[in-house]
Amino acid sequence: MPSVECDPDVARERLEAAGVAVEAGNTDYERWRAERGEATAVAYDDKVVVQGSRPTDLLALLRGDGGGRAHVYFDGASRGNPGPAAIGWVIVTSDGIVAEGSDRIGETTNNRAEYEALKRGLSAARDYGFDEVDVRGDSQLIVRQVKGEYDTNNPELRERRVRVLELLDSFERWSLEHVPRAVNDRADSLANEALDDA
């Protein structure tokens, strides 16, 4: 169980600012408890202990990692194009993986799945409070459309592109690059595992 040495009052403020509900502790020794995703934070007098299968769901918020820079990797997958689709995204800092997620998103095309993965990864990075993001994906089409190098003729993709640009504008600085699938392997694996788990 990771432990964060910090002022519990400051930690509580960070969580509440990120929209995480904080409740009273279960014992006399616990100052408060909070849950997000698959992690539970329990505050004591001089530290916060994080429990659960995915402590990264809370650790970056508690440590105050917000305000820094993160790498966001994204990938979407569709079997049938259109067909069953899923997404995967990963947020990485110099300390390692801060957060990751995957989800089935119903029946859609591969390009729509790629945009959805990008939106979810950017939203998560924003929720964690990062000021700067370096975004990486293995879809050359999506990367070039968002950067304005390719036209976005499909109205549905154009709408998704606008939403992605709005999210990117919420950061002080951002970059977006196409990378080989091997560099994007964790996001790719998450998307494919979500499809396989159906």
Image (cartoon, rainbow, N blue to C red):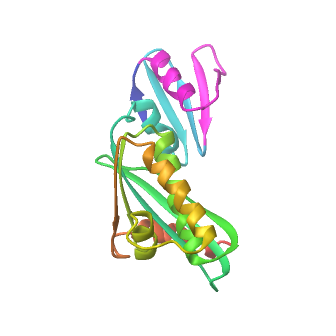
* Quarter residue 18 falls in: top right
- Is residue 30 something that shows in the picture? no
Q: Position of residue 76 (x, y in %)?
A: 53, 70
Q: Establish if 45 lies above or below 97.
A: above
Q: Nearer the viewer, residue 154 or 34?
A: 154
Does the stretch in magenta take in 108? no
Q: Nearer the viewer, residue 187 or 34?
A: 187
Residues rendered magenta in the picture? 7-36
Residue furthest to the left in view is 94
Q: Nearer the viewer, residue 121 or 59?
A: 121
- Is residue 64 something that shows in the picture? yes
Q: Quadrant of the C terminus?
A: bottom right
Which residue appears at 45% of the width and 42% of the height?
Answer: 170
Which residue appears at 42% of the width and 73% of the height?
Answer: 150
Q: In this rendering, would 116 be left or right of 146?
A: right
Q: Position of residue 128 (x, y in %)?
A: 47, 39
* Quarter residue 145 falls in: bottom left
* Quarter residue 32 falls in: top right
Q: How many marks can you see?
A: 0
Which residue appears at 49% of the width and 26% of the height?
Answer: 14
Q: Establish if 193 lies above or below 99.
A: below
Q: Position of residue 30 (x, y in %)?
A: 58, 19
Q: Position of residue 65 (x, y in %)?
A: 37, 35
Q: In this rendering, would 138 be left or right of 166?
A: left
Which residue appears at 40% of the width and 21% of the height?
Answer: 6
Does the stretch in magenta take in 16? yes
